[in-house]
Amino acid sequence: MRILILCTGNSCRSQMAHGILQALDPSLEVHSAGTHPAARVHPIAIEVMQEFGLDIAHHQPQSVDSYIAMEWDYVITVCGGANENCPVFEGKVQHRLQMGFEDPAEAKGSEAEVREVFRTVRDEILKAFFTLYQVYIRKV
């Protein structure tokens, strides 16, 4: 099963979702990309994923343009911007889903407050993608 997770910058939400879904089922082919990819994965996203024993430090933001011609079982957007600017895919897409999450990279406050926003978003992504996996993906 091939799954593409899209976000605007591909530096936080989509990377966390990618790591979570891949950890839930290593047999899945999971990719993540951005409509306007950042230069790197956000360091706090890497930190809060490591708290769960998930290593996304080797991930690199990718452009969605690299994936447009491919076929996908699921294309999942995890932010409003990627959903609104999602390109038309040339390859077949069986299921398109929108699962919006707050952008932790936009969080303001002390370092501890910002880190807590990343943890909250990580936990929301974990819950949503675990449910998605249990209800839809694992059944296939």
Image: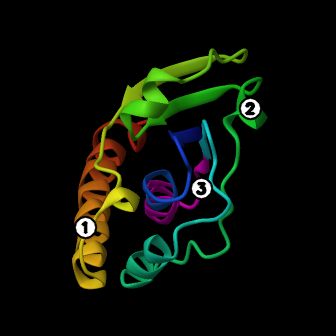
Q: Is residue 54 above or below residue 6?
A: below
Q: Is residue 97 above or below residue 34?
A: above
Q: Secondary structure at mark 1?
A: helix
* Mark with earlier residue (2, 1): 2
Q: Is residue 72 above or below residue 33?
A: above
At label 3, the amino acid type is Ser
Which residue bears the numbered disc 1?
117
Closer to the camera in the image, 137 or 99: 99
Q: Residue at x 40, y 44 (%)?
A: 138
Q: Label 3: state its secondary structure.
A: loop
Q: Amino acid at mark 2?
A: Asp
**Residue 51 part of the magenta segment:** no
Left or right, 85 with respect to 106, comes to right
Measuring 42% from the left and 54% from the top, which residue is drawn there? 13
Task: Give me the disc on residue 104.
Answer: none
Q: Is residue 28 magenta?
A: yes
Residue 111 position in % (x across, y down): 31, 82
Q: Alpha-carbon distance for marks 3 and 1?
A: 30 Å
Residue for point 51% across, 76% down: 43
